[in-house]
Amino acid sequence: MLLHAPGIAHGFFTRHGGISNGVYASLNGGIGSRDDPDAVAENRRRMARQLGVEPANLLVPYQTHSKEAFVIAEAFTERPRCDALVTATPGLGLGVTGADCGMVLFADIDARVIGAAHAGWKGALEGILEATVAAMEELGAVRSNMRAALGPAIARQSYEVGGEFRDRFIVACSDYAGFFCPSVHSGHFLFDLPAFIAQRLRVVGVGHFENLGRDTYAEEENFYSYRRSVHRKEPDYGRQIAAIALV
């Protein structure tokens, strides 16, 4: 794995190992869910322990599907509204949540700069990955030295969309048509979010990229999925966390 390096701790947490119940079973990290807040807090404490940081230093923003990336140097109590965090401060764990969206962890090992980005289709299209890279550069990171790993996300075979969704991408760039293929349903397409994320990172100049290749929708035993919960008409859904820290 690209992010295995001295002084770097990271984790793409699954839904296993927590105390939540029902649709949230068991390691739900989503403050925005309707899960018991005490259970979510304990789940996050367990993640922080695995990461090797204090629970108060496992930092996850208030995600808004934006292209906002924030540089931080200390822990916060009020979550910033953004979709990526970047730091060069040891002891801070940078996290993002996901339940189909791409969760991308970044590191420049030499510069000792890390980042975490939440890249759903909207954020990826609008530039959250590029914003994360630029924020890391502010702290001395070099694009060609950056390593980026995409964790569990919805795969193409599980991501059916309508024609209007596809058109939004093609309006932005006609080449983006290549990330869609026809589905079995007329007028619908399958969208390859992981491949789109990989291409955006390649174009922006990130030196090394890895896709874990895990499908949140298909692997119910391991991952939460917003889309699966909608198809099943479930009342809510859990969120997994991806996090990285300098230790």
Image (cartoon, rainbow, N blue to C red):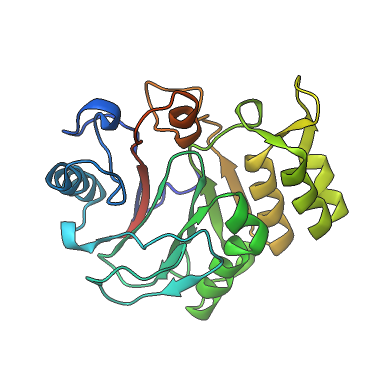
Compared with 208, 26 (above or below) is above
Q: Is residue 113 visible?
A: no
Q: Is residue 71 visible?
A: yes
Q: Residue at x 40, y 30 (%)?
A: 223
Name the spot of residue 101 as percent of width and height, x first.
Answer: 51, 44
Q: Residue at x 63, y 32 (%)?
A: 159
**Left or right of 216, for residue 50:** left
Q: To which quarter of the image does residue 161 belong?
A: top right
Front residue of 148 and 144: 148
Front residue of 137 and 226: 226
Name the spot of residue 206 as percent of width and height, x first.
Answer: 64, 59
Q: To which quarter of the image does residue 12 belong?
A: top left
**Left or right of 6, for residue 108:** right
Q: Residue at x 52, y 29 (%)?
A: 215
Q: Residue at x 51, y 70 (%)?
A: 68
What is the total number of numbered labels drawn onto the structure image?
0
Name the spot of residue 87 as percent of width and height, x first.
Answer: 39, 71
Front residue of 1 and 21: 21
Q: Quadrant of the C terminus?
A: bottom left
**Left or right of 64, for residue 204:** right
Name the spot of residue 177 as percent of width and height, x first.
Answer: 83, 44
